[in-house]
Image: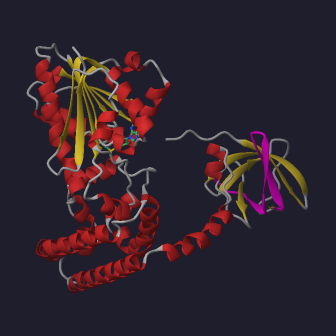
Amino acid sequence: MNAAPLPLPGTLFGRDGRFTVQLKFATNASVFANFPTGTAPPDRSEFDGLVLEVEDRAYQLSRCRLEVEEAQVDPRLVFLDDVYDFSALFREHRMVDLRRVFHNVALVIAQKDQVSPQFRDYTANTVYDLSVYKRFFADQEAMLRKEPASVREAARGALLRAQRTRFFDFMDRGLLGLRQVTASFDDEEHKRHGYYFRRHVWEYIQGAPFLARTNLKPRGYAGDSHMMEMIYEDAFKGNSVFSMLLHRHPLASAAARAVRNRRTMVPLVLRRVQREFQPLPPRGFRFLSVACGPAFEVCDLLAEEPEPEHFHCALLDQDTEALATARAGIQRVQRARRRKFSVAYVNESVRTMLKRADQVDRLGRFHFVYSMGLFDYLTPPVARAVAKRLLELVVPGGTLLIGNYHVDNPTRRYMEYWMDWTLYYRTEAELQALLEDAEAASAELFFEDTGCQMFLQVRKPG
Ligand SMILES: C[S@@+](CC[C@H](N)C(=O)[O-])C[C@H]1O[C@@H](n2cnc3c(N)ncnc32)[C@H](O)[C@@H]1O
């Protein structure tokens, strides 16, 4: 949770004079006004404006009204002519002019003139086909509306089983067409056409929980721990058969299978590294997952390992919700096994590692450090710096493992156009280059079974 932002000084002015106020953040579009030098004007008093002082700047806001609320100590100011973003103003000291946002509408609309005719046809055909599918499924479900819940559920299950292959084949053919029609585009063209495409299929995206989340990014970024859970879970979700199929289809893609593959692959590599250090005392084998997300592979490891007491595990993530999910999963395994594991949860961004020099003192060193689903979001200079820092955390003879999607990921356009999910893809040489200057006993590059995700495994000299 974010702490409450500090109050800001201001002056209200209007027919009845000027009033010095202390403004407190209330909601995104309103503030509370405290009158430190006298009693507040009566409920529903209107003012011509408010001058707000933020650092060394003064912003003039437009007409507003005071509203006294029983549950609040201070009256609320609501704005009558404009909508302001007080979250940005109080938290980031940034004034967002929401009226200006609408100036962009015309610009964005004009972008459609730069959409290729072939892509327009492709989009129109896709939308038509999807709407026909949706209609057919909706008709089937409408017939079931009056059935008892158990009959309805069984019939939905039957529909899903019977139509899954046909619908998935239809989607796969559509994605093949997408790759063909966009094959010659540069990055800018992909962005423009992706936006155009998503506006057309938005109705369908919204219904499918996975697609909706990758697009809406409720935590501010794609690939949050809840999206990862959906990928690992790989189940039908949604309010209709059509939405359930559309939710499930991306979870069957090569990129999603690659995520599930690393869940089994990481414990295998970990065990190989562990064997190199045996015997070790309890909690003697130390490993660190960087950008751990829900840490399902750690739960698997702790659930299956005959002697989990030999591990000490550190889980690092910038997102407290990801860490909470990881903790809940590990606690479930602890309860089931009636054992206590040694786990440290570190709420930190890898960017902090780049700023501070005391990371070994704070975190210690580890026999095995790995990072899955992080480097795909890091620019080359940041990725290089982070990789170097991670290697510093490895004990002599220990191993660092870094995952990254390959430039030839066949799901790339699906992710970019449907999911608004863009990654830093790398070639083999680009991934290896992250640690080319590092002192390593060995460096190995390998792929998981789908071939869309590669791993750089570096062993530190003993
Ligand atoms: C795609 S998920 C991968 C999660 C997990 N490693 C897995 O394979 O299931 C990415 C995770 O990276 C975390 N993350 C992104 N940027 C980060 C940063 N700069 N520092 C630490 N964690 C970060 C996110 O919070 C998210 O949990």
- Which residue corresponds to the image point at 31% horizontal and 58% vertical from the top-left? 412
| Position of residue 179 measured from the top left corner of the image (x, y, whole percent) | 29, 67
Q: Is residue 302 above or below residue 119?
A: above
From this view, report whether residue 153 is shown above or below residue 90: below
Q: Quadrant of residue 393?
A: top left
- The dominant secondary structure in magenta is strand
Range covered by the magenta-colored residues: 47-71
Picture quarter with the C terminus: top left
Q: Is residue 293 magenta?
A: no
Residue 246 lies, in percent from the top left, at 27, 69
Q: Residue furthest left?
A: 306
Does residue 49 show up magenta in the picture? yes
Q: Residue at x 53, y 41 (%)?
A: 2
Please provide percent x and percent y for residue 259.
23, 48
Q: Position of residue 160 (x, y in %)?
A: 16, 72
Residue 150 visible to the viewer? no
**The one of 397 and 10 positioned closer to us in this rendering:** 397
The colour scheme is: secondary structure
**Location of residue 46 by image quarter:** bottom right
- As drawn, 337 above or below 260: above
